[in-house]
Amino acid sequence: MMKDYNKLIFEISKEGRIAYSLPPCDVDEKELNTLIPDSFLRSEDVDLPEVSEVDVVRHFTNISNKNYGVDTGFYPLGSCTMKYNPKINEDMANLSGFSNLHPYQPEDTVQGALELMYHLDQMLSEITGMERVSLQPAAGAHGELAGLMIIKAYHESRGDNKRNKIIVPDSAHGTNPASAAVAGFEIIEIESDKNGAVDLDKLKEVLNDEIAGLMLTNPSTLGLFEKNIKEIADLVHEAGGLLYYDGANTNAIMGIARPGDMGFDVIHLNLHKTFSTPHGGGGPGSGPIGVRKDLVKFLPVPVVEKQGDKYVLDYDRPESIGKIKSFYGHFGVAIKAYSYILSMGAEGLKKVSEKAVLNANYVMNKLKDHYYLPIDQVCKHEFVLGGLINKENNISTLDVAKRLLDYGYHPPTVYFPLIVSEAIMIEPTETESKETLDGFIDTMIKIAQEADENPELLKSAPHNTPVRRIDEAKAARNLILKWEKNK
Amino acid sequence: MHRYLPHTEADEKLMLESIGAQSIDDLFNDIPENLRLNRKLDLPEPMSEMELVSHMKDLSTANKSIDELVCFLGAGAYDHYIPSIVKHLAMRSEFYTAYTPYQPEISQGTLQAIFEYQTMICNLTGMDVSNASMYDGATACVEAAMMAVESTRRDSVVVSSTVHPEVREVLKSYMKFRDVKVIEVDMADGVTDWEKLKALMGKDIAGVIIQNPNFFGIIEDLTDIEKIVHENKSLLISYVDPISLGIIKSPSEYGADIVIGEGQSLGNSLNYGGPYLGFLATTSKLMRKMPGRIVGQSNDVDGKRAFVLTLQAREQHIRRYKATSNICSNQGLNALIAAIYMITMGKKGLREVAVQSTQKAHYALEQLTKTGKFKPLFNKPFFKEFAITGSVESKKVNSELLKHNILGGYELEKDYPELKNSLLLCVTEKRTKKQIDKLAEVMEVI
């Protein structure tokens, strides 16, 4: 029933209805065109919907029912760390003393907010082994960009101006090369070895005095720990480059190993992955960046500092890369990550990583007889399968993913990383129980059997979702990007 | 046990057995010993929910929020009224605990909300297409500048000095890395000096960025500027306050090619500066140069209307280093909030918010300047913000106001050293006559 709701708000609009109330204007009103000349005023009201309050509530409630969130069910989306988002963190971020602060209030009136930011910086620095962390970047990709700007600023500050290349492994997230390009670098892609790790010989071949740095995630996008990381770091450093850590996979190593100790110079974290802040259907994220000691001076302004008992916003940083975003980053998201760390403590965070790794290995071992596992070794928080073992019926990874929808699961990440064909990237996260995992495993095995016995069922899946497979080619060919009357 | 971790000891044992491992440590054998932390992280002891709430309340009450203060501060972040239903609906966890809608069959809620958001941003700005939102107004401005650079194949952008100082700073930080020159054009009596702009124009100028209403709240006359920009085959980039569009002409009417802005005032809490959202809308002609996510309408195999991310060939996960931008996320939840806000206010409500803000701001200026102690800094038509100047230092005025629980204006001298003793004040529909009168009364005796 509910899933049949298929109206756009514009289609239920009726002239004259309203959903708002405002008190009457209590100052002497003047003719608007005596305040603002007619030439600046619009002649017609903006074409926005006219609906009642209950219309708005029903509309959004109904369309929300066509969405799947972590609260709906298991969401093993590799690389995205779709863990449970604790409700209390939302309450904390909504405390009026946080949510109703204007960014330009005098420092004396925002000491609690600044203290929180300062302490979160310290806690994230401790977790990652870095000297300082800036909370400014809005998301992971934004953190990458800021981090790369810092790498560039570092080389330039040494008069080393010809370092204009960044090395990115072919297993990297798409944002890595895109961020490097936006920061003005040329990209050198290196092929991974057969285990998806950095190929040291290939790395040596491309290292020279034009290399600004190497971007890496560890564990890799295959969910495997980069064992040679120390050697990689030494090689890059000897060549005069810096090592950048993409923190997408930090959920595997908290309290166990730290990027700072591995030799990374600049890092970013995704608070919306590792630190439980919700993804919001595509944002807001938060991508703090951390740096080693001699790079602190390049961090974006402002930096929260403590002077005596007082917290201040420090803008007086002449070597800073400058301002990369309005105000101070996603403070509202930072509150949730801060609450999460306080709820977990040191032992809790270590347990998070332990259970995340336990869950991933458990699912991997149960599925490897039914799906192709290209690299059979202990994984970290996630692992990558290469589609069904039995390829006879031409059932693709996409078909498996779409069939999972029928069984009420959010599918894993598919077709990434690019180095595994028909990739299915599974990241269960630590907040899932054995029962949930068993249910998913049974379903995956059942789907593998269906692929043998009734392949059509998969090729035409999903069958039970609010809409079925969508014609994406049509969407791109016949562009409809907004609702228009009579169309 | 921890409340967020469901594994019992028995579960753990069974799972390890099934894997063929003796202990959890076995699963970390691949991490070389010399890289292990081998000590406990130095973090506070874990807190129960009650302890956490108590700690967070202490921190939050160490701040003075605009619940306690009467806010006359704007300058890019605004205290407009947020209807109760906005939060109720946006906090439905089907929306906020979802990821990016990469599986459209089970993400129609998010996708449809973005489609409706895009429609309303187009209607508000008069432009043909909108993307699904950007990080904030400042980064949207950076992306718009890059669109101009890419589409004109020129290497400089002009930005008016009446554009928000932080937006200009962010623009400069980014453009330095793209080898794009940023040229600032001076102002004359609080608006962009079009004669100077004219003198700057040349074959190197990709686009011109004008804020409207500008940083001082003044409505810029873009008639001449539009001609100058387009005669030079540059793009006109207009940075706007979405609330102002309830009464002010849409940027398409004065010939803007790209429209951007800070969308916070569309129902988003102030949140000490973020998360907010940037919006970006443009013409059909420039559509394929647009960064970020875009939702389009299609249908499913049964012919049912369905929404899906489209034009993805521009994006980083497909094009990698050749993408139009490195942006991956949008501000999904903030865009949802903006959509719910625009729908709730609707055609009449958005206009009324804009009208009341205008009326009250003009009343405030009248009250503040009636004895001559303060006078308007500029003499130009304005929307909800205006600058005043007097003989008292702005810092002193603000600290006196704070004693009366009034959050005063933005001290313009910080960014415009020549504008001494000048405050930029903002009056939204939330302010009452009584609050404005009190402001005038306190300022009169400073």
Image (spheres, rainbow, N blue to C red):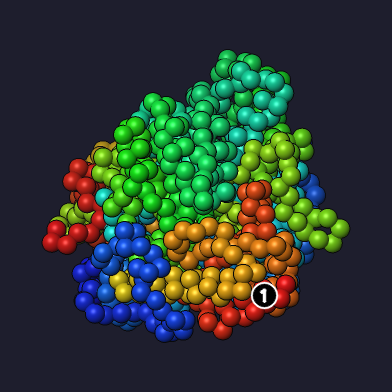
The image shows residue A5 at horizontal and vertical percentages of: 24, 71
Subunit that carries the residue with mark 1: B
Q: Nearer the viewer, residue B39 or B59?
A: B59
**Residue at horizontal 33 percent and vertical 52 percent from the top:** B251
**Residue at horizontal 61 percent and vertical 21 percent from the top:** A163
Mark 1, secondary structure of its residue: helix
The image shows residue B391 at horizontal and vertical percentages of: 70, 62
**Left of A262 or right of it: where is A71?**
left
B338 to A413, vertically: above or below:
below
Query: Can residue A95 be seen here?
Result: no
Residue located beneath label 1 in the image: B444
A188 to A215, vertically: above or below:
above
Quarter that holds the N terminus of chain A: bottom left
**Left of A352 or right of it: where is B255?**
left
Q: Quadrant of residue A153?
A: top right
Q: Nearer the viewer, residue B235 or A200?
A: B235
How many callouts does the rendering have?
1
Residue placed farthest to the right in the image?
A: A308
